[in-house]
Image: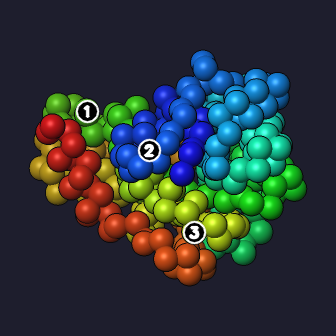
């Protein structure tokens, strides 16, 4: 299949390109090469590439930065997916767009499924929900993939904290917000198989075990024997610009019906993460 990938320099983009099967013909663009907020540039790139599927892995993921740079947030997270959907429709291509657990407000006690009503509480969440809505309005042949607490790309919060703990330095993480920790390589490996099903719609694709970032790091520290000290934080004590949902864990009602395998258990993800650090 001929694929066009945006956000190629991001953590998920790098993980996808590192393991996408070789029989796919992939044209990948970094943000510098293709700003998805530029409608005309997107049209030119997509129509020239003639992809069968577009995978939008580009996003502004700085949750706090979105609060102060709203125009940039909506450009990357709402206008960009809209442009890609319009271009994919013109090219006769499918579109897979990656979204977030932060479209939910965190008030549910159990993990959110695809039929729960979004109610974002931050600019980041609102801008990502806007991208979902534009994609659904424009292009029936779409996949919206919501995921949660992605880690393991090297430049995310968890990866940086693991570096500190491995070097016997102290690290801290929020203990009173729960998501679904998702190993970036496991998420990346699920994307092409989902596209190949052509069973369009919205899917939650995330790690199977709800946990806070503190719980995740405590598990990594224990399993890997990391020497650094880990302490708990409370989100209300951090004075963060953007509010966080207290529970944004995800579950799926529909992924199993596609035949795409659920993501592996968290202990498997941790082992692969630490094995990768030894390479």
**Residue at image mark 1:** 164
| Residues at marks 2 and 3, CA–CA distance in whole angstroms | 18 Å
Identify which residue, 42 or 202, lies in the foreground. Answer: 42
Does label 1 or label 2 sit earlier along the sequence?
A: 2
Q: Which residue appears at 56% of the width and 81% of the height?
A: 257
- Residue 15 spot, x, y in % from top left: 40, 42
Q: Which residue appears at 81% of the width and 48% of the height?
A: 89
| Residues at marks 1 and 2, CA–CA distance in whole angstroms | 26 Å
Query: Which mark's residue is nearer the viewer, 1 or 2?
Result: 2
Which labelled disc corresponds to residue 181? none
Q: Circle 2 sits in a helix, a strand or a loop, which is it?
A: helix
Dot 1: within a 10 Å radius of its alpha carbon, few (fewer than 14), some, or many (20 or more) residues?
some
- Residue 69 spot, x, y in % from top left: 74, 25
Which labelled disc corresponds to residue 197? 3
Identify which residue, 171 or 88, lies in the foreground. Answer: 88
Question: Does 204 sit left or right of 143 as displayed?
Answer: left
| Residues at marks 3 and 1, CA–CA distance in whole angstroms | 41 Å
**Residue at image mark 2:** 16
Query: 62 above or below 133?
Result: above
Does label 3 or label 1 sit earlier along the sequence?
A: 1
Does label 2 or label 3 sit earlier along the sequence?
A: 2
Dot 2: within a 10 Å radius of its alpha carbon, few (fewer than 14), some, or many (20 or more) residues?
many
């Amino acid at each position: 299949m001929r694929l066009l990938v945006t956000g190629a320099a991001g953590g998920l983009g790098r993980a996808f390109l590192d393991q996408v099967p070789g029989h796919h013909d992939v044209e990948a663009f970094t943000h510098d090469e293709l700003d998805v907020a530029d409608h005309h540039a997107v049209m030119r790139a997509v129509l020239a590439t003639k992809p069968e599927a577009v995978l939008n892995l580009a996003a502004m993921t700085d949750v706090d930065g979105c609060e102060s740079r709203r125009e940039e947030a909506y450009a990357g997270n709402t206008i960009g997916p809209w442009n890609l959907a319009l271009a994919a429709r013109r090219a006769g291509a499918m579109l897979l767009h990656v979204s977030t657990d932060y479209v939910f407000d965190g008030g549910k006690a159990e993990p959110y499924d695809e039929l729960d009503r979004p109610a974002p509480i931050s600019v980041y969440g609102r801008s990502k929900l806007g991208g979902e809505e534009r994609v659904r309005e424009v292009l029936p042949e779409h996949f919206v993939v919501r995921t949660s607490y992605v880690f393991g790309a090297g430049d995310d919060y968890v990866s940086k904290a693991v570096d500190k703990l491995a070097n016997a330095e102290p690290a801290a993480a929020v203990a009173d917000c729960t998501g679904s920790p998702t190993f970036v390589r496991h998420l990346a490996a699920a994307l092409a198989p989902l596209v190949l099903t052509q069973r369009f719609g919205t899917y939650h694709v995330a790690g199977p075990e709800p946990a806070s970032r503190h719980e995740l790091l405590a598990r990594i520290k224990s399993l890997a024997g990391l020497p650094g000290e880990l302490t708990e934080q409370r989100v209300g004590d951090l004075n963060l610009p953007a509010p966080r949902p207290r529970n944004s864990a995800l579950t799926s009602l529909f992924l199993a019906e596609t035949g795409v395998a659920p993501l592996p258990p968290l202990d498997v993800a941790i082992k692969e993460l630490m094995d990768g650090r030894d390479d």
